[in-house]
Amino acid sequence: MSNKDDVVIVSAVRTPFSRFDTAVADTPSIDLGMVVMKEVINRVGVKPEEVDEIYYGSCVVAEFALETDVPARQASLLAGFPAENISVTLDRACCSSLTTLRLGTLSMKAGEAKTVMSVGSENMPRTPHLAPGLRKGVRIGHIKLIDALFELGYTAKGFNPVALDAGEVAIEHGVTRNMQDEWAARSQELCLKAYAEGKFKTGEELTPIVIPQKKGDPIVIDRDESPRKTSIEALSKLRTVYGSPTVTAGNAPPISAGSSAILLMTREQADKRGLKPLATVVAAVSSATEPRGIAVVPAYTIRKALDRSGLKLDDMSLIEINEAFAAMPLVSTKILAGGDEKKWAELRGKTNVNGGAIALGHPVGASAGRITMTLAYELRRRGGGYGVAAICGGLAQGEAVILKV
């Protein structure tokens, strides 16, 4: 039954996700965040001053450090939100924009807020090289530069590259390189099919990125740039990366830029405003496991969400598991199937039905918001039901949300 204190999604939007070599590469993630922050409230007639709290996720610190380290505050002020608005920036790796949703939900459940915005924004191609020690001065000799994107910096403190962990754990669970290549081809095919059917479109999930030019018309990007036709044969020829036994550039997502925003309200507040919710947040949970377990943590987090909600896996009409690598949805659905091959095939069939990050891209701070809204919009197209979205984050953190439409 509906409750006036239910947390509901009333608006959800994202920018298209870019390729690495794109016109978006020079646009600060703060500016991308501003695009969706404005759009998500404009769609439902909410004024900036009516948003009680903003939770903003971003995890490539080196990029937003170019504008200092308070992107939530900067983006909210530059987007026209009042100086009195409460905002917070957080980094929980790829989980960040579901962590923002969960914390916003908790604030609303505690009675601290009635309207909350959950944002994620990232521009990975803009990440600068770092020159540690340069401030002290170099009398003579070469300057060492560090690429913050290479291995995502994990090896600096002795951890494995996540591609290595994902590949090894996949093999341990009987998920082969060929299975991962097949999943990658499926992701591309389903994404292109979704575009052909008009599922990813401006005015629903998408809002354009407009990049002014010194001369001539602005560049307008109104669709994801990375989806492409491929084949198992082409994918099988690619070399593995970072020492992984299975992960390649083909069964992993492209490095991307993009942003996402979700507007949350209490059901009572939405009713007062005459807004029809896109979805109800049934449960939002976090988890973590041993650092190398990045491919298994979505399954553990989904189980935790189901336990929290009192629902069963069979109640879920759709599943979204972020394709940080193809290993994640494959390993996690196999765990959820409990070793039942028929059940595993069934779960794969209702997971990422419009493709995933391998095709669309993975601007890490924004992706959790993306899988959440993709799930909500697809459930609505199918007439409603329950669905779960889950994502892994660096060193095996997890977030999951169950939605009812």
Image: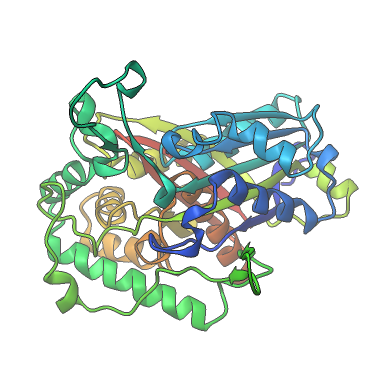
User: What residue is rendered at 33% in x and 36% in y?
Assistant: 394
- From the viewer's perspective, tell me whether residue 79 is left or right of residue 292: right
User: What residue is rendered at 73% in x and 44% in y?
Assistant: 79
**Looking at the image, residue 185 lies above or below residue 261:** below
- From the viewer's perspective, tell me whether residue 283 is left or right of residue 159: right
Closest to the observer, 271 or 189: 189
Q: Is residue 124 visible?
A: yes
Number of numbered discs on residues = 0
Instruction: Name the outermost residue toward the front.
Output: 140
- The picture quadrant where one finds residue 119 is top right
Q: Where's residue 275, x and y in %? A: 82, 55
Instruction: Name the outermost residue toward the bottom.
Output: 196
User: What residue is rendered at 27% in x and 60% in y?
Assistant: 344
Closest to the observer, 19 or 308: 19
- Quadrant the C terminus occupies: bottom right
**Looking at the image, residue 247 lies above or below residue 233:** above
Q: Where's residue 304, x and y in %? A: 42, 36
Q: Is residue 105 visible?
A: no
Q: Where's residue 229, x and y in %? A: 32, 80
- From the viewer's perspective, tell me whether residue 154 is left or right of residue 244: right
Closest to the observer, 212 or 301: 212
Q: How is the image coloured?
A: rainbow
Instruction: Name the outermost residue toward the top.
Output: 136
**Looking at the image, residue 156 lies above or below residue 79:** above
Q: Where's residue 351, x and y in %? A: 39, 62
Closest to the observer, 200 or 122: 122
**Looking at the image, residue 152 lies above or below residue 378:** above
